[in-house]
Image (spheres, helix red, strand yellow):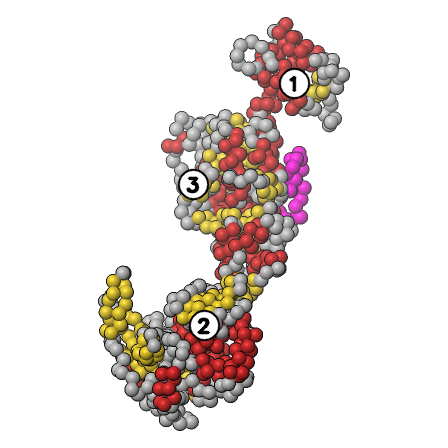
Amino acid sequence: MSPDSFMRVNASAFGRITELLPIWLPGGRQEGQEYVCASLDGGQGRSCKVNLATGKWADFATDEKGGDLVSLFAAIHGLRQSDAAQRIAENLGITPNQSPYALSEKASARRGTSSNSPGQIIMPVPSHAPAPPDILRRKVAGSWVKRIVAARWAYQNEQGQILGYVCRFNLPDGGKEVVPQVYGEADGKACWQWKGFPVPRPLYGLDRLAALTTDDLVLVCEGEKTADAARRLLKNAVAVTWPGGSKAVNKADFGPLGGKTVIIWPDADRCGYEAAIDAAEALASMGTPTDIVLPPASVKSGWDLADAEAESWDSTQVMQHIKHNALSLPDFKDVVRNKYGIISNNLYINPTKKQNTLNVIRIEKGASGEIVDDCEAVLAKLDLPNEFKIFQRGSQLVRLGTLPTSSQSCATDCPQDKVVIMEAQKSFILDVLGRYGRFVKLDHRSGELRAADPPKDVAETITGRAGLWPMPPLRGILTCPTLRPDGTLLLTPGYDPKSQYYFAHRLNVKISSQPTHSEATNRIEFVKDLLSGFSFVEPVDRTVALALILSTMVRPILDHMPLFAITAPVRGSGKSYLMDIAAIIATGRRTAVLAATTDRAELEKRLTGSLLSGDPLVSLDNCNGALQSDLLCQAITASTVKVRPLGASAQVEIPSTTLWSANGNNLVLAGDLPRRSLLCRLDPGCERPEERKFSFDPLERVLHCRTEYVSAVLTILRAYIVAGRPDMGGKPFGGFGQWSALVRGALRWVGEPDPCASRDAIMDDDPELAQLRTLLPLWWQEFGKSAIKIKQLIERSHSNDTGLYEVLDDIVGEGKGPGINARSLGHWLKLKKDNVVCGLKLLQVPGKNMASWQVVQVKAGEA
């Protein structure tokens, strides 16, 4: 090649330097004005650098360097610079093609003696070259060790000339090392070197292709040992392979196989399948479609034709397997996708994913909003497995979790195998996206899309998009069939979009869609028999227990539900037992128990934990003293509540869907709880009620016959609905109109007392109301309807013996001797103003400097 032609080729290559370097040195990357890689074979690293502005290059690992791209190409492929320029010209379309391997021995010898490029590989090997050495010296753990060749495979061109060798060394630990051996220049003289073949690398078995007839088969295997086994098994076929194993298949020269009948038999593992796909795609790009053989399903990982030979396979068996298991490239991809997730060119999907749940999401700069939208679409799919579904609950993203063992969380005893609501943390969101989204990213080196992990900042963005989430809303969890708001039966397990509840049950309940009044009365007797061992004080107390059982079944369709309070004078009366019976019917397990405490701040923390976990039933157990909680009052009568999760600074808004109960010895409800509650009183009338004997165990009966009791409860309620929900009269129960129109009405319809009659006992026991009932009649007796100051009230209480002082001292006395705190009394009166008791009403009368207080009489029905 003339100097002018040489310069023209060099200039043409330099003009396309950023396009050519990723091809010549695959795996490298651009850093500023340099292209960097591991070595002249490419790969990730920084030992080899090319200046993009000048074309100068250097491989610091071998001390090779040059001033232009032609010398770089020559060093990469072990060529003379004139040959390198010729090859570049061919690739750029300047000159015809020339085979890199089919050289005469004379030309080979000349190339080996006249090159000015250090370290070049000479192929084919000259005939005068010495025999290759059998010893390889390696530095291991700081010491030099000598290894001896255990097997050697000769690579030859189509004329039978040696191109080089691949040698295997057996290691002391039982492993093996495979090293290529080529002939080339080093330190100014030709010699054998432990170095790889230049790219594109020749195939093993080219020498046998010359004798191949048109109908003969070419079998591509992985590894020289396997190719030799294939050659022995198939006498009329040519078996070939490439050097370097599965990871180097893209560096092989499959050109000599063009136009031939080719079958690929891969190793039976992921790397083998990947290499087979890459080889088939390389052949297809040359116009040579090929089939790939699917190895036997029962073989061990890595199994190949060498193993088949060791297992005494014969030629007929091999050919029969090829006949029945050779697949086209697209079909092979489809089959192995489910096993290894390979789809093309190192792009993988998780083989455990169902293909119909995969969304392809492309990661690229400037598209963060679209990426998050696509990720949310994945999370919002309802066909995901239950354990990976994500829901929105108020202002929080949640998931369903199963507690496999008993655990203590927020003082709540959670039974085994309980489905609870848990926060969907960012790590969980990324896990779901990684499983059911397919993320791809453009590889700028190869121009191909490659598999990628979901970006971590996506989870952060998703959790911050409250109010925009497409995920389905979740109100709570139910573990038995129930009724829809329209009164129809809801029996199917799973998520119900209409009610927004998740139903986690396996009951096969059969209920008539049109039950009668007779069936309902029969079923209420069936349920009442379950409670026959309890010592209810009055029939209304048993009705409250029945109302509790019915209410647990229909909590989802009612916005609000009263607190069920169970009290008894002594321990062992069956308070917790009664709640457990209702819980087992509704949930299949005992109720979640919340340890009561007189510390209001601690109680609110425990209540918050139960609200966040979505417990359908919670019992405040062993309430000592007066039970009072503003948060509990809100949870009973509000559709949603705002709570602050433990350790968080921000509040979250969540639906309030729990049925609350409380029990204690001589339980007292205070504050606003009395008007939100029903009371069930038990009194066994003996010193040691725990020693009583009964004809049957209600819990055991419910556990064995749960389906029958669920059917009974739903039959009662459904029959009342079918009858048109007749009005059963009674005083309104403010705030619980829906509950009264269904549960309360159904019980009265089947002949039971009004459960709201129990509220008289609650109001009588309300300590704050009792104080007001005592104070106002004494006030009226002393002052009539006159407006007075607080100071006058305190002074009058000291001046007579009507009992007024004792009442005020009980209300705001400080317990440190005589004296009533006027400020505390004024605060208490403000809390009770406009209350009406005993026909008297407390009013606050505005004044210039200080308000006055007045008690007036009111008639029934007046506000």
Residue at mark 3 to residue at mark 2: CA–CA distance: 71 Å
| Residue at image point 63% right, 14% down | 822
Q: Is residue 159 above or below residue 508?
A: below
| Residue at image point 55% right, 77% down | 11
Residue 792 is situated, as x and y percent measured from the top left of the image, at: 68, 10
Tell me which numbered mark, 3 or 1, is placed earlier along the sequence.
Answer: 3
Residue 61 is situated, as x and y percent measured from the top left of the image, at: 38, 66
Residue 805 is situated, as x and y percent measured from the top left of the image, at: 60, 11
Contact between labelled residues 1 and 3, with CB atoms less than 8 Å apart: no
Q: Which mark is residue 826?
A: 1
Q: Is residue 539 above or below residue 851?
A: below
Residue topped by disc 2:
66
Region rendered in magenta = 718-740
Mark 2 residue type: Gly
Task: Tell me: 337 left or right of 442.
Answer: left
Q: Quadrant of residue 844?
A: top right
What SS does tag 1 mark? helix
- Answer yes or no: is residue 522 visible: no
Residue 778 is situated, as x and y percent measured from the top left of the image, at: 65, 13
What SS does tag 3 mark? strand
